[in-house]
Amino acid sequence: MLEYLRIAVRSIWANKLRSGMTLMGMVIGVWAITSMQGVVLGFDRAMEKELGALGSETFVVQKFPAVQVGFGHGQRRYWRRKNLTYDDALFLQSISSNIRAATAVVEARAKTIKYQDKKTAPSVKVIGTMADYLSTQAVDVGEGRFLTGDDVIHTRQVAILGRDVAAELFPFTDPLDKRILVGDQGFLVVGVLDQAATTFEESPDNIVIIPITAYIKIFTSSRRDMSSTSLYIRAWDVEHLDTAIDETIAALRVRRKVPPGDENDFELETAESIMSTMLDFTSYIRLAAIGIAGISLLVAGIGIMNIMLVSVMERTREIGTRKAVGGRRRDILMQFLIEAVLLSECGAILGILFGIGTAMVLSPILNMEVHVPLWAMLAAMGYCSVIGIFFGLYPANQASKLDPIDALRYE
């Protein structure tokens, strides 16, 4: 076996350019499979981490589905739905004994926050919400205080800063009781959030939280501006979750005048249901990537077969000599088959290395942990071995069947 490997390595090395061109398809196919599996796996884990922060007793009511696919009429029917409101959150908390906290959350992106001569990039997320926000989120206040019911009722222009915003505007100063500009409106800083866990989407510390009533007054000029409003609702415990969900659905259907028999004009999602939907979605991406890369590997296999046929033709006299001195058909078959498999495996190893490199580059760019799973590496190696055996068998068989006399006469 070692002798077969030595001969195969020598043959591949003797035709470096040809072997390298043959490997390109195999490398690209394996690279596509491994890097895509790494990205999808990283996305799934980031989603699990982010949705796990909601807690098993928390659910979300929103206007749009968590995952939207397609365009046209299906999308328009979601836009025609009524917006969820701050009053809906107050209503739900007042009518249900199974709800521990209910808060409305609306957000705007791409805002610039200023303090004196300092300002942030125009990418800060501004969140309008209520006093119960902390009860439904995996965040807490590190300095100062959070919003109170009076802040919301009296539309006070107070703000709680995320850690990134506080560090950028107040690198050497206590931010509490300082006045900042959110857009062109002044707000008094009353609190700073604790450092939050990083998510795949963006830094959760790059935010400013203000009372939802102040948000509505300052940042909304049309019905569309409030279309992103969501209701975050937390049951007392997991045992009361189903009851709280049923009560929420029934109450909102009555409040929003949904006729009996019609489907809900809102979406209700738990962390588990969102995760299940996202896993279904990413499984299709994973299968599509495998299918496309698989076609690339099949094409690469055809290239390997052609190169092996050329190699058999070039080494016809060598084959004749080996047979003339006692070489068996099985030995010739094994030699060329191992050469084809080794060529495939070289492509697989290079593709895996490129995939790992791509994952290392994408991790900081996508702000999530991207790494190639071991099963994807092993699957790529196994699939390439099968490709090498399947497409190398015919050339190897042709070489093993050569007549030694005819082979020695070959010019």
Image (cartoon, rainbow, N blue to C red):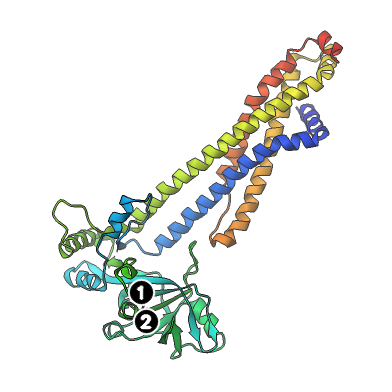
As helix, strand or loop, the secondary structure at mark 2 comes to loop
Q: Identity of the amino acid at label 2? A: Phe
Q: Give the mark count.
A: 2
Please tell me which residue is depicted at 47% across the width and 45% down the height of the picture: 285
Q: What's the residue type where badge 1 is placed?
A: Leu
Q: Determine whether 362 is above or below 382 in the image.
A: below
Tags 2 and 1 touching, CB below 8 Å: yes
Residue at the farthest left position: 260
Relative placement, left or right, of 11 versus 369 is right
**Camera-nearest residue between 193 and 317:** 317
Q: Quadrant of the N terminus?
A: top right
Q: Going by the image, does 276 lie left or right of 42?
A: left
Q: Is residue 94 above or below residue 73?
A: below
Give residue 134's mark. 1
Q: Nearer the viewer, residue 380 or 240?
A: 380
- Residue 385 visible, this angle: no
Residue 34 coordinates in the image, percent (x, y): 58, 45
For the C terminus, give its image quadrant. Answer: top right
Count neighbours of disc 2 (C-alpha within 10 A) and say few if under 14, some if 14 to 19, many if 20 or more. Answer: many
Can residue 32 be seen here? The reply is yes
Find disc 2 in the rendering and name its residue.
Answer: 146
| Residue sitting at x 61%, y 41% | 30
Q: Residue 202: give x, y in percent of width and height.
A: 49, 66
What is the quadrant of residue 283 in the picture?
Answer: top left
* Quadrant of residue 50 within the rendered picture: bottom left
* Whole-percent x, y for residue 155 in the image: 30, 84
Give the spatial CA distance, label 2 vs label 1.
8 Å
- On screen, residue 230 versus residue 350, left or right, reads left
Disc 1 element: helix
